[in-house]
Each structure stands twice: as C-alpha cells, then as structure tokens.
Image (cartoon, rainbow, N blue to C red):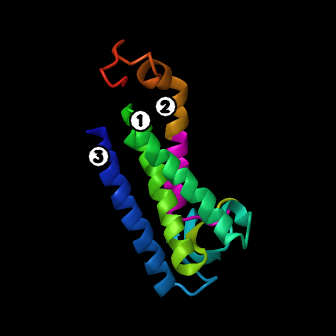
Amino acid sequence: MAYVCSALLAGALLGLDQWVKRWVSLHIPLGEARPFLPGLMELRTVHNYGAAWSSFSGMRWMLLTVTGAIVLAILFLLARRIVRHPLGVLGCCLIVSGGLGNILDRLRLGYVVDMFSLQFMDFPVFNVADVCINIGCVLGLIYYLFFYETHDKKGGGGDGTLDSSGR
C-alpha cells in the first residue's frame, strides 16, 4: 500500500511541477517577479542551466546522465523491494518525482525552469521538483538513520523473519 500511495503522490507532484513551470513561463516574463507570499516568497521566472546554485552550468548532458542514473538506482531499490518501510518508500518516490521533473525540463528545454524566490534571505530560486528532491532526501536520511536497521536491513526484517524470497 505504501508503494501505491507514494507513487500516486509522486505522480501528482510531478504533474504539479510541470504545470507550475508552464504557468510561470507563460505568465511571468523571464527575470521578472510577482508577489506570491508577500514578505516571504515571490514567483520569479528563471532559467537554470546548471544544478543547485547554478553549479555545473552548461553541463546539460552530464546533469541528465547523473540525474538519470540516480533515478534509475532508486527505481531499482523500489522494484526489488529493498526499501520497504513507508517512510523510505515515500522518500524514494519524492526523489524520483523531482528528478524526473527536472530531467523533463532539461530534455525538452535545455534548462530547468525555477520560480520560487525567498524574499527574507539570499537563497537560490527553486521549483516544485527541487522541493520534492530535498524533502525526499530528508525523509530518506531519517529512514536510514532510524528505521533501516530494524525494518529493511537484510537479515534484520522488522518482524524478525524473512520470507522465502529473502525479503
């Protein structure tokens, strides 16, 4: 059940990411901003040719390759049911959703559309996919630190047993 719910949420967030990027691109000219949460955040259309903080700018194919490899590795973990705890599954699905959102931009546009700009601090502009990736990483870290050993580690199954397939 955790797999289905997490996958549905990830799919909805991927759709939201693509919709917000399209809406912002159509309604806010490049480099301009509109109020969103006054004093906290504004919507600003930015084309990011790199990764976080525009690192690796102009290295589109390297970013596509690395992001694609990470997404495939996480999908492998999910498909093989190596990660079974609901928190780990959710974290993985969020990372996959965000990774796919940014991959789609890089493939289709050659850059990633970013739009959320914090007004109360100097921070890079980001998008829904970036939020998914970061929340997924935090959930994955919490899962690994607190649940992996007792729930998913081979030979350590949460109920103390493994089924006939070794899971």
Q: Looking at this view, is 28 or 128 the one in front?
A: 128
Report the predominant secondary structure element of the magenta stretch. helix
Q: Residue 23: image x %, image y %?
A: 43, 79
Q: Amino acid at mark 1?
A: Leu
Q: Looking at this view, is 37 or 128 the one in front?
A: 128
Question: In which quadrant is the N terminus drawn?
Answer: top left
Q: Amino acid at mark 3?
A: Cys
| Residue at 44% across, 16% down | 155
Q: Are marks 2 and 3 in contact (CB under 8 Å)?
A: no
Reply above or below: 23 against 84: below
Q: Which residue is mark 1?
A: 87
Q: Which mark is residue 143?
A: 2
Label 3 neighbour load within 10 Å: few <14, some 14-19, many 20+: some
Tell me which corner region of the image, top left, top right, bottom left or bottom right, holds residue 78. Answer: top left
Circle 1: element type? helix
| Residue at 40% across, 38% down | 80
Q: Which residues are magenta?
A: 123-138
| Residue at 50% across, 52% down | 72
- The number of numbered badges drawn on the structure is 3
Q: Residue furthest front?
A: 165
Q: Looking at this view, is 115 or 151 the one in front?
A: 151
Q: Let me know if residue 42 is in the magenta part.
A: no
Q: Kindly report the distance in space between the C-alpha atoms of the residues bearing marks 2 and 3.
A: 17 Å
Question: In which quadrant is the C terminus drawn?
Answer: top left
Reply above or below: 4 against 127: above
Q: Are marks 2 and 1 in contact (CB under 8 Å)?
A: yes
Circle 2: element type? helix
Left or right of 161, for residue 73: right
Q: Residue 145: image x %, image y %?
A: 55, 26
Q: Residue 157: image x %, image y %?
A: 39, 18
Q: Which residue is mark 3?
A: 5
Compare marks 2 and 1 and give the one earlier in the sequence.
Answer: 1
